[in-house]
Image (cartoon, grey):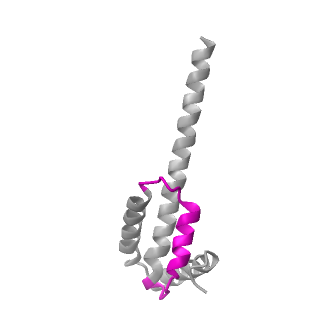
Amino acid sequence: MLIKAGVLVAAALAASVAAAQDMKAIALANELGSLLASEALCELSYDQAAIAAFVEKRVKPDDMSFTNNLRMMTGGQEIQLKSLTASGKTAHCTQIKRVAKSYGFTR
């Protein structure tokens, strides 16, 4: 009985770790999607090699859902960004510029 309980606990732990990793990947796609969707709005021009390096470093090579999640998140952000007020755009673009620079997407 203890062995079965141990196996169940191990399986639950493995599932929890996998779910946490999935959530991290989705969050990464969301954050990168916001950054990419903001490029034109914030009058930026990103270094394509820096974007590629970012993806290479942070996205698992076997993550087949990343591109779909990124496309969905980028599209959603583009729609939301259209409704920003002038002040909202100022605040948004100020932070986007800081993040883009910190990732090496801009100079």
Question: On screen, 77 above or below 40?
Answer: above
Residue 27 belongs to magenta span: no
**Observer-nearest of 74 and 54:** 54
**Observer-nearest of 82 and 96:** 96
* Residue found at x 57% / y 78%: 100
Residue 60 belongs to magenta span: yes
Residue 92 visible? The answer is no
* Residue found at x 47% / y 63%: 30
Query: Where is residue 11 drawn, in percent x and y?
Result: 55, 29
Q: Which stretch did the figure color magenta?
A: 40-65
* Residue found at x 57% / y 84%: 106
Which quadrant holds residue 83? bottom left
Residue 26 visible? The answer is yes
The quadrant the N terminus occupies is top right
Query: Where is residue 81 drawn, in percent x and y?
Result: 41, 76
The quadrant the C terminus occupies is bottom right
* Residue found at x 46% / y 86%: 86
Question: On screen, 45 above or below 25?
Answer: below
- All told, the count of numbered labels is 0
Q: In this view, does 61 lie to the left or right of 82?
A: right
Query: Where is residue 82 drawn, in percent x and y?
Result: 37, 78
Query: Where is residue 58 drawn, in percent x and y?
Result: 57, 61
